[in-house]
Image: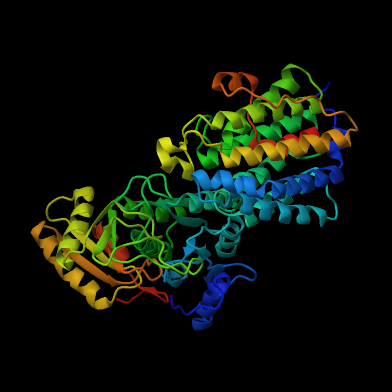
Amino acid sequence: MSGDEPIEAASDGAAVVAAVEAVAERIEDERAHLTELDSAIGDADHGGNMARGWAAAAEAARDLDDPDPQAVCKTVGKTLMAEVGGASGPLFGGSLVFASAELDGGVTAENAVAFAETYLEKVEDRGDARVGDQTMVDALTPAVHTFKKSVETDGLPPLEALAKAVDAAERGVAFTVPIRAKKGRASYLGWRSVGHQDPGATSTLYILEELLAVAAAALDAETPDVDATSPTIPDEAAEGGAGDAADAPDAGEGGD
Amino acid sequence: MKKLINDPDDVVDEMLDGMTAAYPDRLRRLPDTQVVVRDDAPVDGKVALVTGGGSGHEPTHAGYIGDGMLDGAAAGDVFSSPTADEFEELIDACDAGDGVLAIIKNYEGDVMNFETAIELAEMEGVEVESVVVNDDVAVEDSLYTSGRRGVCGTILVHKAAGAKAAEGADLSEVKRVAEKVIDNVGTMGTALTSCVTPEKGEPTFDLGDDEIELGIGIHGEPGTERTEQMPADEITDALTEAVLDDLDLDSGQEVLTVVNGMGGTPQMELFVVNRRLQELLGERDLEAWDAWVGDYMTSLDMAGASITVCAVDDELKELLGAPADTPALTRTR
């Protein structure tokens, strides 16, 4: 399909608000699990901080008078920045604010890719993290790369591209388990961080999964079969474009 | 633990209201934020200096707002970074069109939130530069940082850069001075007791009655070495030598020293430390130019002190000695 053709469902602000609400609900459901993951290697506040932030973001998105996709993304990003705090506020929220600039004039497959790439770039720069550091970047990078390749090289419809991105993110989350943390609080554990799943990569995956679910529902399409059982081999994950978290919002925009 | 607090959740909010009430003609709190600025901000014709960080380090940060030092500061919750949106409001409120210098202490949360705010402010057309203070010689990486922590040396950055901004220097010059201080300053601290955060209500870490911790940070995070309690002179020697070894100064170099109380140490003890510190400078063939003693960068009620040494040249002497008029630091000529 043509990359500059508007994605109807994503251009409908209400669908984007619905996606944000779905993410808020999912994060709340997974709150205890995220906190458990964080208490093993961090300071046990990821679940609570993210749940509080996304609940506030959903409320702010609902309150928008004219919820076009760009406005929703910017509002959600600003709210996450203000409510999540710590390092996650700038990483999840600040990156979304900057990426929303790519959505000028509605959502197309083309600018959804730009949105995803900007989001990833901001997370990498702000966190000074790269693939293999046991951070959200491990989920996000493969997701963004897979989304880009699926749209630009394979010419897949945005929804299918998003489904592949979610699959890639899932592999990326699995990839965080056997590696050693190089960034974030977990890095102070040194080798003891090996064997633990990264909470930020995990919440990134949840965000992407909800975006896909809402996008699929909005398009009244069957959710493409996402292979959730993913190998944990880094090479495979990289090839598959596995990755997830941080760009979830923008991938979601595109998918919608 | 007995404390003069109401609800732990309200401590920062109530502190900021009390602080602005104490200096109503000098400090102003931006509505619905934890940001405090000069009452007359934005000040025309000068670069604005802003900073911020977790609360619990008083008089840092808002205590240094005023003529010759800061234009404003964002306060986070106790030992937590302010959020990026609050930093952005701070920058907006202080910018008078001549640019803003953000002075950031090297903690991951502070750096990420401030940098996000700076990028957002730049998108709105504000000219912003930043410096990251990392004067703690004790540790390379800590619980809260990649690289060294920013501690009491930050006050000297506020002072020198603030004086330069007051002269009407442009943003690049003010930043150059801030970096000059950062390049020439080192600090190391010790804790005799743990601090008690309002939230937890009990000591953050266990330290035996006869133990001290060297190389401590300003949040109760671990230091580099736990030893038996020693006389003041021996502690002073250990801290000072760590700083001087790191700075590696030439013989005859002039220095400014700061003996900083961590919040729970009597001035009497700080002066005892300063006495030995000044002796030690002589033994190391260094020239004492000025000596500051007091509570500048605290860690709630922690007992202990840090020692800061800053090598000074004519320019830094001029700026560090220049007039300043803030709630926590006043200098007259």
Q: Position of residue B247 (x, y in %)?
A: 23, 50
The answer to whether any part of residue B105 appears in the image is yes
Q: Nearer the viewer, residue A253 or A140?
A: A140
- Residue drawn 68% across the image and 49% down it: A77
- Residue drawn 53% across the image and 53% down it: B114
Q: Position of residue A93 (x, y in %)?
A: 65, 48
> What count of labels does the image hold?
0
Q: Is residue A177 left or right of residue A164?
A: left
Image quarter hosting the C terminus of chain A:
top right
Q: Name above or below for residue A180 compared with residue B285.
A: above
Q: Nearer the viewer, residue A209 or A58?
A: A209
Q: Nearer the viewer, residue B206 or A236?
A: B206
Image quarter hosting the N terminus of chain A:
top right
Q: Position of residue B266 (x, y in %)?
A: 28, 77
Q: Name above or below for residue A30 compared with residue B205.
A: above
Q: Is residue A198 left or right of residue A203?
A: left
| Image quadrant where residue A175 sits | top right
The answer to whether any part of residue B51 appears in the image is no
Q: Is residue B265 left or right of residue A108?
A: left
State the colouring used for the structure image: rainbow
Check the image and name the residue furthest to the right: A220
| Image quadrant where residue A64 sits | bottom right
| Image quadrant where residue B307 sits | bottom left
Q: Name above or below for residue B324 compared with residue A48.
A: below
Q: Position of residue B151 (x, y in %)?
A: 36, 58
Check the image and name the residue furthest to the top: A154
- Residue drawn 22% across the image and 68% down it: B290
- Residue drawn 55% across the image and 46% down it: A38
